[in-house]
Amino acid sequence: MKNIVDFLSKISTLKDKPRRGWVIHEIEDAETTSDHTYHLVLLVWLLGNKKDINVEKAMKIALVHDMCEVYAPDLTSYDAAGLKEEGEITREELENSTPLLKRPTPNQRKKMLKIKEELEVEGMNKLLEDSGEDTKEEIWSLWNEYEKALTPEGKFVKQADRTINIFQGMEYCKEGKIEKEVYKLWLERAKESIDDPHLLEFLEEVEAKLNE
Amino acid sequence: MEEKRYYLTKEGLERIKKEYEEMKRQRRDKLKKESPEILHSEDVNPEYLAFRRDLAILEENISKMEKVLRNAELIEPPKKECKDIRLGALITMETNGRVEEFTLVGTMEADPNIGKISDESPIGKALLGKKEGEEVTISSSFTTVYKIKKVCYK
C-alpha cells in the first residue's frame, strides 16, 4: 500500500501546476493540470456513453493522459512557434526559447514533438518507478493508447482533450480573459483537428454558449 | 450493418500492421508467463485480477485493430496529374492571410500536429472534391474562407 500512497503524493503536484497555455496567455489563476483532467474525464464519460467504446477504459486514459507532467514540462504549440526553423534543436534550446502566440510551422512542431516525447517518457518512467508492477503496466498501456491514438478510446480521448480546452477557452473568453478574435482562431483549428461527431456537436453548443 | 471503411496511405497501413503485431507479441508474452493463482488465502488474488484485466484490454485492442485491417482501403495517389482534392492530397491553403500545408487523410491517420487532416473533420469534408483555385467557406457563428492555392500528390 505504501507505493500507492507515494504515487498519489507525487500526483498531488498536478493540483498546483497551472496549464502553460493559459499562463502564456497571462491568465491569472489559470486552471491546473488536475482541474483540466477532471473536466476531461467528465466529458469523456458523458459523451463516451453515446459511443460504442469502452467508457471505463477511456476515462482511465483521460485520467493518466497528462500524468507525466509531474516531471515533464507542459509544452505547447506556442513553445514550438518560438523555435528556429532550420537545423536541429537541443533540450536546452527548447527550455530557453520564448513562446510565440502564433501557429508553429510543421517543421517547428516536429522538432518540439520529438523532444517533448522524450521528456514525457522520462517523466512517466520516473513517476512510475516505485508504483508497483501492476499499476505501472496498466498506466503505461493506457498512456500509450492516448499517445498513439489508434484505438477508438485513445483517439476519442485525444480529441476530447482538444475539445475541453476549447470549452475552457470559452469560459475564459466569457470572463474577458481571452479575446474573441483569438478564440475564433481556436475554433477554426478545432474544425481541422476534430472529426468525432459527438465532440463536434458539443463544440457547436460551446460556440453557441459563447454567443449567448 | 456494413462495417466502416478505413482509408489509409501505405505508410499508415504499415503503422497499423506494426502496432497490431506488437499487440499480439504483448499478448503472447503475457500468456507465456504463469497466470497468478486465483485465490490468495480465501480472497481473490489481486494479481490474478490484474492479469485478467490486462489480458482483456489486449484482446479488446487486438480485436479492434483486426476490424480496422479487415476494412482497410489503401489510398493510392492518382496516376495522372490531378488538381482535384482526394484522399492523400497535399493542399496549400490560405486562410486569413496565413498560408499552410495540409495532407487530407482518413480518420485513423489524422494528426493535426503534423498537418494531417481527417476527411471526416468539418474542413476535410468541405475540401473533398474541390479543385485548385477554388474556395471553401466554413460558416458557423463566424465565417472562414479557405483559398485552395495548390493541390498535389506525392
Image: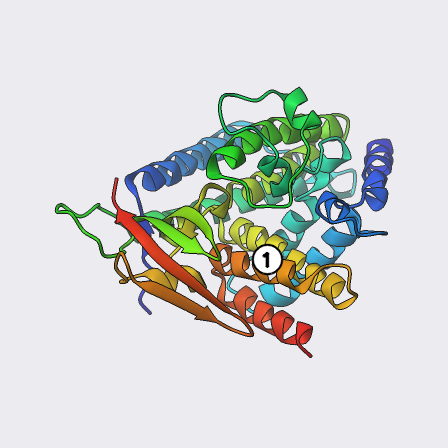
A16 left or right, relative to A120: right
Q: Is residue A72 above or below residue A93?
A: below
Q: Toward the viewer: A123 or A188?
A: A188
Q: Is residue A210 above or below residue A136?
A: below
Q: Residues within 10 Å of mark 1 (few under 14, many from 20)?
A: some
Q: Toward the viewer: B138 or A47?
A: B138
Q: Is residue B148 above or below residue A3?
A: below
Residue lying farthest bottom? A212
Type of the residue with mark 1: Trp
Q: Secondary structure at mark 1?
A: helix
Q: Quadrant of the C terminus of chain A?
A: bottom right
Residue A179 screen position, x and y as percent: 70, 61
Q: Quadrant of the N terminus of chain A?
A: top right
Q: Residue at x 73, y 51 (%)?
A: A37
Residue A35 screen position, x and y as percent: 79, 53
Q: Toward the viewer: A6 or B120?
A: B120
Residue lying farthest left? B80
State which chain disc 1 sits on: A
A40 left or right, relative to B144: right
**Quadrant of res B118:** bottom left
Residue A72 screen position, x and y as percent: 71, 31
| Residue A69 appears anywhere in the view | yes
Q: Residue at x 51, y 29 (%)?
A: A85
| Residue B120 appears anywhere in the view | no
Q: How many marks?
A: 1
**Residue wearing tag 1:** A186
Residue B89 screen position, x and y as percent: 29, 49
Q: Residue at x 78, y 43 (%)?
A: B42
Q: Toward the viewer: B60 or B44?
A: B60
Q: Residue at x 67, y 75 (%)?
A: A209
